Amino acid sequence: MVCYGIFFNPNAGDGESKSTAQQVKKKLEEKNFQVMLLTASDAVKAIEMLIEKIKVIDKLIVIGGDGTLNIVGTAFITGKRTVPLGVIPGGTINNFAKRWKIPTEIEKAVDIIMAGETRKVSIGQCGNKAIISSFTFGRLADISNDVRQSEKRKYGLVVYPYKAFRHVGGNTSYLVKYKTEKETVTLKTWVALVTTTSYVGGLPYTFHDENAFHISILNNIGLKKIKAYLTYAFTGQMKGKKTITYISSEKISIENMDESVEIQTRIDGDPGPNLPLTLEWRKDFIDLMVSTEM
């Protein structure tokens, strides 16, 4: 008998993941599948639990957003084992699910999972941690560290440009070296955004479609460049802006050139380690359950 694991974070998105998990469990059991509900009190315990559970389940369903998916991706990496993955979006933005056209409606997402079709998709890796959707640092990441989950729920995406606007101008850039297999550049960086797909904030922001990291670096942002920044903040559109450097690479080393400051990163919306760091591309790492109509 096929055994599904259903992993959910009760604190993700609108907090209804537990109820969704129980609905999905009932639907699967009606089809005579074996089902295990999986959750934990924090990310560390969840990763440890998932590493053990993926040894005994056949497929895994995740309910949540990019942060919850990151826990699963990290368990796959550290446990050195994967199983076919189904997603029921339940986060605030759901970049990963939107890129792969996974519907937010529970019934439609379950239908895709039940169909059993999969495709290989790639993710990133930073140390032993997965990068499902995004890796970022700079002033926007610093600001994001101050945005509470309750604010995201109440105000939506507008909370980010509002807080960022208050920091436009002034000496807020970091001097950072970027080294890829093709080039090495040192740039003043107001914010650097590394994504695994061409989506950010649930919107496509570049026409590039390489099977590699998308690396976009916003240079110093002052009042003269406010139009370019606002275009990015509200639409995610970055292509063609002179204030932006774009790089595509399967491996990138990022080094802080100013020892007087620490630069903290964010990975899939949550605080990450400080620079220096190296990011590596895990090509075709996950068997993702998607619609055959993609």
Image: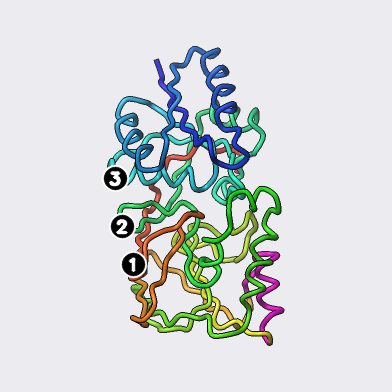
**Relative vertical location of residue 240 with respect to residue 202 in this rendering, above or below:** below
Confirm whether the magenta stretch covers residue 181: no
Mark before the other along the chain sequence, 1 or 2: 2
**Residue drawn 35% across the image and 61% down it:** 280
Q: Which mark is residue 86?
A: none
Towards the viewer: 37 or 152: 152
Look at mark 3 in the image and give the residue it sits on.
78
Type of the residue with mark 3: Thr
Do labels 1 and 3 touch, CB within 8 Å? Answer: no
Label 1 Cα neighbours within 10 Å, binned few <14 / some 14-19 / many ≥20: some
Q: Position of residue 273 (x, y in %)?
A: 37, 61
Return the disc, 1 or 3, that comes first in the chain's sequence: 3
Asked whether the residues under the numbered discs 1 and 2 touch, taking CB atoms below 8 Å apart as contact, a structural biologist would say yes
In three-dimensional space, the C-alpha distance between marks 1 and 2, rounded to whole angstroms, equals 8 Å
Q: Residues within 10 Å of mark 2 (few under 14, many from 20)?
A: some
Between the residue at mark 1 and the residue at mark 3, the CA separation in whole angstroms equals 18 Å
Q: Position of residue 149 (x, y in %)?
A: 59, 50
Residue 277: assigned label: 1
Q: Main secondary structure of the magenta part?
A: helix
Q: Quadrant of residue 164?
A: bottom right
Check residue 228 for magenta coloring. Answer: yes
Which residue bears the numbered disc 2? 127
Q: CA distance from mark 2 to mark 3?
A: 10 Å
Residue under the image location 62 percent in, 57 percent down: 201
Residue at the (31%, 52%) spot, across then down: 128
The image position of residue 106, as x and y in percent, is 63, 31
Q: Which residues are magenta?
A: 224-239
The picture quadrant where one finds residue 65 is top right
